[in-house]
Image (spheres, rainbow, N blue to C red):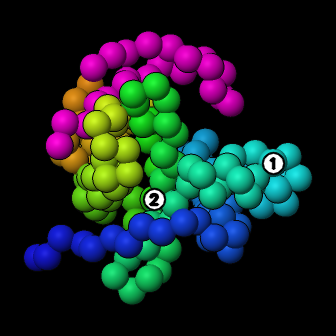
């Protein structure tokens, strides 16, 4: 079986609005975004055109169908990744290839930067996918999120 091919390009407003419609099953429902109207009204994340342009990309399959998104958040010497797959694509074994494609794109965009991500410790499905993609857990800590205080792993991409 061939590995999936992903195309990564700037996130359009229509892709952003579509992502706001995605609904994940329990226990992943916390990863849903607010409505597109709420996102644009508040200027939150990709609801702000400038943040969307600088940090967000759409991930499409070989047929140009939207299958996910990524955020490249640059910090001093580090690019922190955020990512999400369309709900019907989750849990089917494609997460590692998806995460690896995003990490490789981050490396291309930010040569020499460390590439990392945070994942909540309970999300073993994502942790396994990230490990298969080449990420290694380097730290565990608590931080504030929209759901309150959460425990996370920091995982660094090693190629």
**Range of the magenta residues?**
138-159
The answer to whether 158 is drawn above or below residue 60 in the figure is above
The quadrant of the picture occupied by the N terminus is bottom left
- Which residue is more in the foreground, 109 or 142? 109
Query: With 136 as the anchor, is 105 left or right in this view?
Result: right
The residue tagged 2 is 85
Question: Residue 115: which quarter of the image?
Answer: top left
Please check the rendered image and state whether residue 113 is part of the magenta-colored stretch, yes or no: no
> Which residue is drawn at the image coordinates 37% and 15% (left, top)?
140
The residue tagged 1 is 43
Question: Residue 24: which quarter of the image?
Answer: bottom right
Please check the rendered image and state whether residue 153 is part of the magenta-colored stretch, yes or no: yes
> Which residue is drawn at the image coordinates 44% and 13% (left, top)?
141
- Which residue is more in the foreground, 109 or 98? 109
Q: Secondary structure at mark 2?
A: strand
Q: Is residue 99 visible?
A: no
Crowdedness of circle 2 by 10 Å Cα count: few (<14), some, many (20+)? many
Q: Is residue 9 visible?
A: yes
> Which residue is drawn at the image coordinates 25% and 58% (left, top)?
97
Q: Position of residue 143 (x, y in %)?
A: 56, 17
């Amino acid at each position: 079986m061939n590995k999936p091919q992903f195309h990564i390009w700037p996130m359009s407003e229509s892709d952003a609005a579509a992502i706001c419609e995605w609904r994940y099953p329990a226990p992943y429902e916390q990863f849903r975004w607010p409505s597109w109207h709420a996102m644009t009204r508040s200027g939150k994340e990709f609801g702000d055109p400038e943040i969307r342009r600088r940090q967000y990309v759409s991930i499409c399959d070989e047929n140009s169908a939207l299958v996910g998104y990524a955020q490249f958040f640059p910090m001093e010497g580090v690019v922190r990744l955020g990512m999400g797959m369309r709900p019907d694509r989750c849990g089917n074994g494609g997460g590692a290839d998806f995460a690896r494609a995003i990490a490789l794109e981050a490396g291309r965009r930010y040569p020499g930067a460390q590439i990392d991500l945070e994942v909540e410790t309970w999300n073993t499905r994502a942790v396994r996918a990230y490990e298969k993609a080449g990420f290694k857990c380097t730290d565990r800590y608590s931080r504030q999120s929209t759901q309150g205080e959460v425990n996370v792993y920091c995982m660094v991409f090693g190629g």
